[in-house]
Amino acid sequence: MSQPPWQWETATAGAVAGFATVAAMYPLDIVRTRFQANDGRVTKFTYKNTAHAIFTITRLEGLRGLYAGFSPAVLGSTVSWSLYFFFYGRAKQRYSKNREEKLSPTHHLAAAAEAGGLVSLCTNPIWLIKTRLQLQTPLHQSRPYSGVYDAFRTILREEGWTALYKGLGPGLLMVSHGAIQFTAYEELRKLVVDYKKRKGNPDSDSNLLNSFDYALLGGSSKIAAILLTYPFQVCILAIIQRPSSEGIPKYMNSWHVVKETARFEGLRGFYKGITPNLLKNVPASSITFIVYENVLKLLRRLRKND
C-alpha cells in the first residue's frame, strides 16, 4: 500500500468531491425526499413517477423549486465528505500497524463506521434544515422558512436546540451505509488492481485505475449500500419533518415510525422513493469517487513537485 497522503489532502479532495456531487444531482434529491415524505394515510405530494415529479415541481414552483434547500445541501455535502475522508484516512492509518500491510475488510468496515459516526454528530443540524427546506412548498407550508438562517432561528425558538438533532439515532444507524459502501469500494478496488497487475500493467497502485474504474467502483458500492440501508433513510426523514402548526410532531420516535409505516404501507413503505434515490445516488457516487481520486492524485503531484 502506498504511503498515506497528508490528511489535508484527503479532506480537500473530499470537499471538492462533495460539492461537485450535490451540484450535479440535486434535483433528484428533491424528488427522492418528497416521495419519502408521503405515507399510507396522507399523500402530500401527488407525483406519478420521477419524471412527472420533476415536471410538476418545475411547473408549480419554477426551477427554484428543484433547488430548494440547495445552500445547506452544498454546505452539508462539502463539510460531510471533507470530514468523512479525513476521519476515514486517519482511522485507516491507525489500524495499519505497518504501512505496507493491506487492511482487511473488517478494518475498512470499522474505519468507515467510525468516520460516519463522527460526521453524523457534526452535520446533523445541517441535514435537518436542508430536508425541511426541501419539503416546504407554497401548497403545503403555511409559514415557510425564508432561508437557512430563518429555519435555524425558527427551529430554536419553536422546538429548542435538541430539535436540531432529531433523527440522530437512526442517523447513527445509517453509519452502516457508509461502512458498507466504503468496504465494498475498497475490496472491489483491490480486485480491479490485482486483475490489472496480472495483465502485466507496470504502473503503481495509485496509477493503475482511471476515471472509468472509479465510476464503476463508486456506483457498484453505492447500490449495495442503498439496498441494505434504505429503510433507515425513510425513518430519518419521517422523524425530522416539521411539527404541525399546533406543535405536535407526527412521530414520537424511531420505533413509532417503524410501526406506523409497517401498519399503513407494509414492506413497500420502507422503500418508497428508492427509484429517484438510485437514479441520483449511483451516478452521484461515481462522480464523488472520480473527483476525489483525481483531485487526490493532483494534490499528491503538486506536493511532490514542491
Image: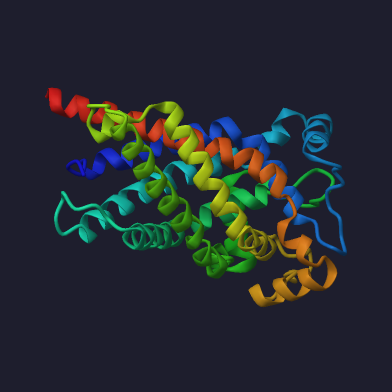
Look at 57% across and 40% down and name the residue there.
282
Q: Place residue 26 in its image quadrant.
A: top right
The picture places residue 167, in percent across and down from the top left corner, at: 58, 65
Quadrant of residue 37 within the rendered picture: bottom right
Instruction: For the C terminus, give its image quadrant.
Output: top left
Residue under the image location 58 percent in, 46 percent down: 148
Q: Is residue 172 left or right of residue 249?
A: left
| Residue 76 image position (x, y, % from top left) | 49, 46
Q: What residue appears at the point 82 percent right and 50 percent down from the top-left corner?
A: 140
Q: Quadrant of residue 82?
A: top left
Q: Nearer the viewer, residue 194 or 90?
A: 194
Task: Please tell me how many numbered marks the rendered image carries.
Answer: 0
Residue 60, placed above or below residue 281: above
Q: Nearer the viewer, residue 72 or 266?
A: 266
> x%, y% of residue 85?
35, 47
The reply to whether residue 68 is in sight is no
Task: Give residue 75's position: percent from left, percent from top.
Answer: 48, 42
Q: Is residue 200 above or below residue 267?
A: above
Looking at the image, residue 210 sits to the left or right of residue 61; the answer is left
> For this rendering, which residue is in front, 209 or 155?
209
